[in-house]
Image (cartoon, rainbow, N blue to C red):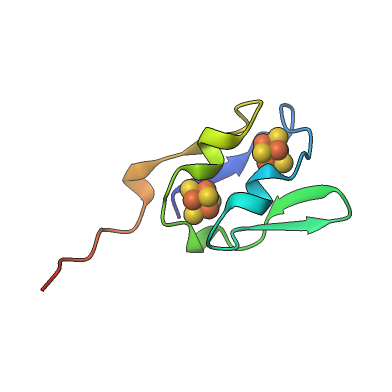
Amino acid sequence: MAIRDIDRVKCNDCGRCYLICPMDVFGKVGRRVYLSNPEDCMPCYLCEIDCPVDAITIDAERGRPIPLPY
Ligand code: SF4
Ligand code: SF4
């Protein structure tokens, strides 16, 4: 679970993280974006990079280990 939380003070519910996440980590109720499956975060950093107000912080130390190729 590399994603920590959405900073609700900064977040404007633009929905970009919801659209870009390949793992369905984000959910939506109306316009409101929330973390529905944070344990599925890889992390790929797309949401952190794309968020226009820096409301998302990804902590690589908390991510899943990268599987060995053998
Ligand atoms: S991209 Fe950022 S501002 Fe937009 S909904 Fe996600 S956390 Fe909020
Ligand atoms: S880092 Fe990638 S997998 Fe994790 S929440 Fe953001 S977009 Fe989804």
Q: Is residue 61 above or below residue 1?
A: above
The residue positioned farthest toward the bottom in the image shown: 70
**Does residue 31 appear left or right of residue 52 in this picture?**
right
The one of 29 and 20 positioned closer to us in this rendering:
20
- Number of numbered discs present? 0
- Determine which quarter of the picture holds residue 47: top right
Residue 60: image x %, image y %?
35, 43
Pick the quarter of the image with the C terminus: bottom left
Q: Is residue 53 above or below residue 1?
A: above
The residue positioned farthest toward the left in the image shown: 70
Q: Is residue 16 above or below residue 35?
A: above
Residue at 67% from the left image edge and 52% from the top image edge: 18
Residue 63: image x %, image y %?
36, 52
Residue 69: image x %, image y %?
14, 69
**Does residue 37 appear left or right of residue 58 in this picture?**
right
Pick the quarter of the image with the N terminus: bottom left
Residue at 42% from the left image edge and 49% from the top image edge: 44
**Does residue 18 appear left or right of residue 62 in this picture?**
right
Residue 52: image x %, image y %?
65, 28
The residue positioned farthest toward the right in the image shown: 30
